[in-house]
């Protein structure tokens, strides 16, 4: 158990209590699952854990290594919409269950139980209790997971954690330990794109009439996160500075439900912008972003889509999370403008934003939009 992983003494005490019950959990879990089997006998596996867009994209960098390490085992995954879209066509995945982690006895639970999985990889490093419990109740005899926060009695194949490091590196370590590979491959998200995805991206690019003679900045200003988001007014001030600094085109991007926010921001700007409010699904959005020169984003799903596209990305990390875990994981193209502070509670985040100036953010974006020639 790693005390630094806990945000409060109470959480640590609760985790320690689960370890006192570990022998009881081991015996009880076998009632539902039977005994664990050898890794070489695994034929059908399930990936289960956090499943928002970023969570799923974190795992895509290591899925092919997982498939390579288990040539006789197929892998399914839980991923609701819209995150499921980034897994479509991935050769490492047999089936995408488009659902949240189900509750015991629900229709979705019974659907998964009928699959009769040999192994579940519960890949979360934070709140992994529920995935482990559901995997056990599903009768899955082999359960791969972390034990540094307790609940080892439900894990049959524990994974050593190297804490802290970027979130996608944790899954890379998990796959490397299971398959005995060296954990050295790239962490950039990998999404399988179709010809149709590229055609949809080209069609929207033409529809927006973006000029070829000026670089394009795509800006995402919204997120599902309730706290830790760089204020909208800061984005507005940054875009105004950018408009006056160099010739380029600005496009405001978001989901369909963000359209009113984007329109409101557009009305506050002193210059015209283009708007892409969910006009593309996630997969075609990646080749669309690849045509842009720079992405300016919140610390949200679009940040990881930009990394999948390989486009220079400027973002402001959510200060509620660990700097190491939520920070840069594509160092050749990703730029975090947040200071080194971390675990900043919501009531203190107003003061935190004073550490990030719009001038610094604008300067970084301009340098990427107009790189100096050697």
Image (tube, helix red, strand yellow):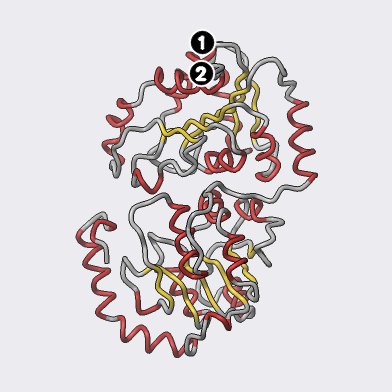
Name the quadrant of the N terminus.
bottom left
Q: Nearer the viewer, residue 188 or 17?
A: 188
Q: Nearer the viewer, residue 319 or 347?
A: 319
Residue assigned mark 1: 245
Which secondary structure lies at badge 1?
helix
Label 1, residues with CA under 10 Å away: few <14, some 14-19, many ≥20:
few
Q: Does dot 2 land on a helix, a strand or a loop?
A: helix
Query: Which image quadrant for residue 254?
Result: top right
Residue 89 place in picture, x, y as percent: 72, 56
Residue at image position (62%, 79%) is 43
- The span from disc 1 to disc 2 (Cα, nearest Å) is 8 Å
| Sequence order check, earlier mark of 1 and 2 | 1
Q: Which of 64 and 303 lies nearest the eye of the viewer?
A: 64
Give the quadrant of residue 262.
top right
User: At 43% from the left edge and 76% from the top edge, which residue is drawn?
Assistant: 157
Query: Mark 2: few, some, or many residues within 10 Å (few <14, many ≥20)?
Result: many
Disc 1 + disc 2, Cβ < 8 Å:
yes
User: Split into 4 quadrants, where in the image is the C terminus?
Assistant: top right
Q: Is residue 3 left or right of residue 95?
A: left
Percent position of residue 226, x then y: 42, 42
Q: Which mark is drawn over residue 268? A: none
Q: Residue 73's x, y, as percent?
A: 63, 75
Res. 366 mark? 2
- Residue 6 horizontal side relative to residue 270, left or right: left
Q: Position of residue 27 (x, y in %)?
A: 37, 89
């Amino acid at each position: 158990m790693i005390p630094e992983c806990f945000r409060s003494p109470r959480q640590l005490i609760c985790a320690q209590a689960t370890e006192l019950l570990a022998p009881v959990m081991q015996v009880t879990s076998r009632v539902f699952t039977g005994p664990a089997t050898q890794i070489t006998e695994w034929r059908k596996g399930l990936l289960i854990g956090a499943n928002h867009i970023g969570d799923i994209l974190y795992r895509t960098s290591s899925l092919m290594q997982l498939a390579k390490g288990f040539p006789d085992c197929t892998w399914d995954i839980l991923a609701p919409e819209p995150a499921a879209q980034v897994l479509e066509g991935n050769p490492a995945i047999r089936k995408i269950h488009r659902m949240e982690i189900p509750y015991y006895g629900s229709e979705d639970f019974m659907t998964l139980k009928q699959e009769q999985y040999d192994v579940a990889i519960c890949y979360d490093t934070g709140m992994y209790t529920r995935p482990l419990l559901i995997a056990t109740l599903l009768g899955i005899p082999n359960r791969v997971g972390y034990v540094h926060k307790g609940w080892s009695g439900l894990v049959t194949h524990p994974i050593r954690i190297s804490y802290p490091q970027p979130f996608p590196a944790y899954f890379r370590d998990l796959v490397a330990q299971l398959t005995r590979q060296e954990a050295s491959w790239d962490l950039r998200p990998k999404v399988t794109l179709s010809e149709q995805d590229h055609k949809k991206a080209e069609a929207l690019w033409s529809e927006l009439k973006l000029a070829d003679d000026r670089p394009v900045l795509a800006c995402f200003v919204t997120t599902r996160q309730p706290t830790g988001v760089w204020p909208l007014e800061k984005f507005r001030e940054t875009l105004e500075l950018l408009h006056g600094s160099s010739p380029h085109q600005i496009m405001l991007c978001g989901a369909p439900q963000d359209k009113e926010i984007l329109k409101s921001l557009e009305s506050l700007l002193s210059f015209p912008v283009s708007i892409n409010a969910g006009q593309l699904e996630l997969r075609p959005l990646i080749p669309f972003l690849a045509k842009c020169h720079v992405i300016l984003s919140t610390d949200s799903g679009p940040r990881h889509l930009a990394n999948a596209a390989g486009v220079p990305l400027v973002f402001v990390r959510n200060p509620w999370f660990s700097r190491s875990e939520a920070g840069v994981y594509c160092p050749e193209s990703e730029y975090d403008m947040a200071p080194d502070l971390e675990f900043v509670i919501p009531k203190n985040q107003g003061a935190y934003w004073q550490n990030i100036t719009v001038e610094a953010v604008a300067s970084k974006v301009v340098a990427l939009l107009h790189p100096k020639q050697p």
